[in-house]
Image: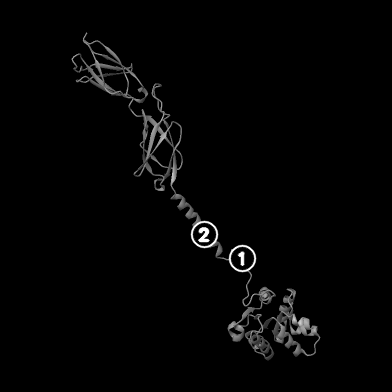
Amino acid sequence: MEDQAHATDVFISFKSADIALAEALYHFLISKGLSVFLSSESLPQLGSSDYRKAIDKALDECKHMIVVSSKVEYLNSSWVEAEWGFYIGEKRAGRKTGNILTVITNDIAIKDLPASLRYYQVIFFDKDNFDQVAAYVGKNYEDPVYKPKPKNFLRSKWVMPVLLIIVLAGILWYYINKKNQPFDLTVFAAPDPQLRLSPDYPAFESGRLSLYAGNKADSRTILPGQPVTFQQIPSSFLHKKVAVSLDAPQWKLAADSVVLDKSPVHLPLIPNGAMGAVFGNIKDGNGNGIPACSVAIDTDTIIQTNAAGYFKIELPFPMQKRQYILSVTKESYQPQRVDYFPGSGSIDILLNKK
């Protein structure tokens, strides 16, 4: 009996009218492995005839106290008040370090409890709260406040909206940040496949491609069918039209601007016109221009010199090539046949009198 009393974890104080409440809590705590003193259960087990002495001993040696009540007046009854008053006195004096809590029914407002009990933990009588009571007076309790079971965070009604806002904000941040990132542009350049050119027209071999993003010019050497990459173009130029140019013999870009995109860009090339210009002067032996001379370019085109003996023609793409044969005729003059190389500039052709 001495060992059992000394080992008491919890002393339950109650008014006899609340015996059903006290016993329900008693059996729950016993099932959790706690040593509990409840007069209606413990005194018969102790076999003591001096109930008051046994109660005082249990009260003196218990670690924790639970006061159970369904009415405020029960808390103020002589025996119940004497028990919790003794425990609080011992606790204030430092002779007890355990916890005292009041378990009340919903019929009692906490504000109506005695001030000394309100100062400590109060829990409403509900079987769903028994785990809290057990934790508060358990063998590994943490004084003085009960730490409830962690709530399921995801079940809180405000959690999902908050998570959704966080996710949407993250997505928005990602796209804004991505949108503001510099980008690279890959470019291909090759003759326009729709062109009909002479087999003798010079093939595109290489060139210097320039891209103008704002006030900045960036140039790359480009080969036929081979990509070049312009790197770190500011995001502000994405989907914008910028100027481009090509420096290459006999070739130029079909358009002088391009819309920048992250997808590869294919630039079509066309002849730059240098191979199509045929011009010069027809002169006599004295160096004077001969008007109305017939100038045949190869066998396809015939033009006339003007009053000063000057001729010029821009041949279309299909007729342009590396070399032309010019045949010049004029009544009373000996005909003349010469080779003309486009890009060589103006040519002077001498006609002699017959």
Residue 104 visible? The answer is no
Q: Nearer the viewer, residue 166 or 106?
A: 166
Q: Quadrant of residue 101?
A: bottom right
The colour style of the image is one colour
- What element does badge 2 sit on? helix
Tell me: residue 123, above or below residue 354: below
**Which quadrant does the C terminus fall into?**
top left
Q: Position of residue 289 (x, y in %)?
A: 20, 18
Question: Which of pointers 2 and 1 lies earlier in the amino acid sequence?
Answer: 1
Q: Nearer the viewer, residue 99 or 171?
A: 99
Q: Count all numbered tags in the image, as a single digit.
A: 2
Give the amino acid type for the residue marked by disc 2 in the picture. Ile
Q: Position of residue 72 (x, y in %)?
A: 63, 86
Which residue is depicted at the point 37% across and 23% down?
318
Q: Which disc number belongs to residue 152?
A: 1
**Left or right: 19, with 296 as reference point:** right
Q: Which disc number belongs to residue 166?
A: 2
**Left or right: 110, with 234 as reference point:** right
Tell me: residue 236, above or below residue 15: above
Which residue is depicted at the point 39% across and 35% down?
209
Give the amino acid type for the residue marked by disc 1 in the picture. Asn
Q: Position of residue 78 (x, y in %)?
A: 67, 91
**Left or right: 305, with 33 as reference point:** left
- What element does badge 1 sit on? loop
Tell me: residue 321, above or below residue 233: above
Q: Position of residue 125 (x, y in %)?
A: 66, 78
Tell me: residue 81, above or below residue 129: below
Q: Quadrant of residue 229?
A: top left
Give neighbour class at mark 2: few <14, some 14-19, many 20+ (Cα, 10 Å).
Answer: few
